[in-house]
Amino acid sequence: MNKERLYFYYTSDLHSHFENWPQIVGYFQEKKEKHDRRKEDYWLFDNGDHVDRFHPITEGLMGKGNVELMNRAAYDVATLGNNEGITLAKEDLHSLYDEADFGVVCANLVCHHQEAPTWLQNYKIETSKQGTKIGVIGLTAPFRPFYQQLGWDVESPYDILDSLLPEVEREADIIVLLSHLGIHDDEEIARRYSSIDVIIGGHTHHLFKTGEIVDGSLLTAVGKHGTHLGEVMIEWDNDTHTLVNKEAYAVPTEHLGKDKQTTDDLLRIRKEAMDHLNTPVTRLREPLHITWFKDNELMTSLTDQLREWTSSDIAMLNAGVLLDHLPAGEITYEEVHRICHTR
């Protein structure tokens, strides 16, 4: 029988926890070298929420440092999570992947009021050395009220799959879904859409140490913060045009070997980000103090700006969203980022 093994490696919900990034890249590099020697096909995916503004690299470069790291790791396809989608200003999201060397797929994200970014695709077709076509679709969590406030929109993943799947089925032999929707939607999609072969899951930070089969679809997930990376192997029979085997594993990263070049890249990119964050934004004549359970000038100013920005009647913020005071003197972006509760 004329069979081929196809390998997919992936990250999901990294949330800019770069402490595990050198191990992840080191593992990918090791696997790539092995597959290249064996002339086997492999692809590298990210399932969203790679970006998280708690980290200075992400805040200082508005996610573009994340994209540079993914470029250097040679990713093939990524989708967007809610952290890319609703924590960046519209213009920052619009340009986030302008320099990406990988495809970006998110079929239910809609750009309003201006032309969609050139990087945004509904799906991408990857082709193996033997000509087998893999359709990779991306979907993100439909937090519609938040997207609409930011000048975007996001549609129901089920409506999108109803209209899009017939087109992908005509073009692809195998269909992989990058799903930043959560475990319950992944299970429901598996039950509804039999043509989806593999669902790479995320958003709810669930972990499947080995793959779960739901109505014939292989579900896989690796938790959060890069504590695990994903590995999927599928076996395709070119004579019968059928999948004859599907396997998935979550690989712990803690004790994997680190890629030195990636460690060096992180240091360099962090320095670049800190240079941006050290830009002054204002100078205070007196310190601004924060109290969690009483009115104070700093919190009142912030809620007033929030109310004006959203054109709302009332604006509220949780106690504890600001963690520290601002001193008198020059205030930089880094100082503002430091006092914000971003985890």
Image (cartoon, helix red, strand yellow):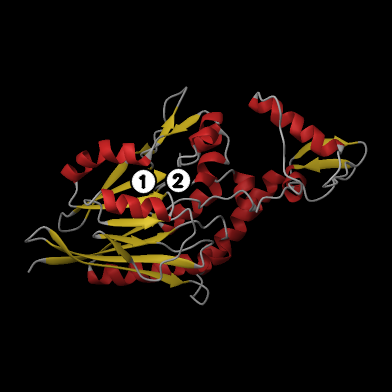
- Percent across and percent down for residue 132 are 17, 55
- Percent across and percent down for residue 99 are 45, 42
Q: With respect to residue 198, does 256 lie above or below?
A: below
Where's the N terminus, which quadrant?
Answer: bottom left
Q: Give the secondary structure at mark 1.
A: strand
Q: Give the secondary structure at mark 2.
A: loop
Q: With respect to residue 65, does 330 lie above or below?
A: above
* 306 left or right, relative to 142: right
Per the image, the residue denoted by label 1 is 138
Where's the C terminus, which quadrant?
Answer: bottom right
- Percent across and percent down for residue 222 are 44, 64
Residue nearer the viewer, 65 or 87: 87
Per the image, the residue denoted by label 2 is 80
The three-letter code of the residue at mark 1 reads Gly
What is the crowding at mark 2: few (fewer than 14 residues within 10 Å), some, or many (at least 20)? many
Residue nearer the viewer, 103 or 243: 243
Which residue is situated farthest in the right direction here? 286
The three-letter code of the residue at mark 2 reads Leu
- Quadrant hosting residue 87: top right
- Badge 2 vs badge 1, beta-carbon distance below 8 Å: yes
What is the crowding at mark 1: few (fewer than 14 residues within 10 Å), some, or many (at least 20)? many
Q: CA distance from mark 2 to mark 1?
A: 8 Å
Q: Is residue 101 visible?
A: yes
| Picture residue at 55% right of the left edge, 59% below the top | 265
- Percent across and percent down for residue 107 are 35, 39
Residue nearer the viewer, 153 or 238: 153
Q: Is residue 76 visible?
A: no
* 342 left or right, relative to 298: left
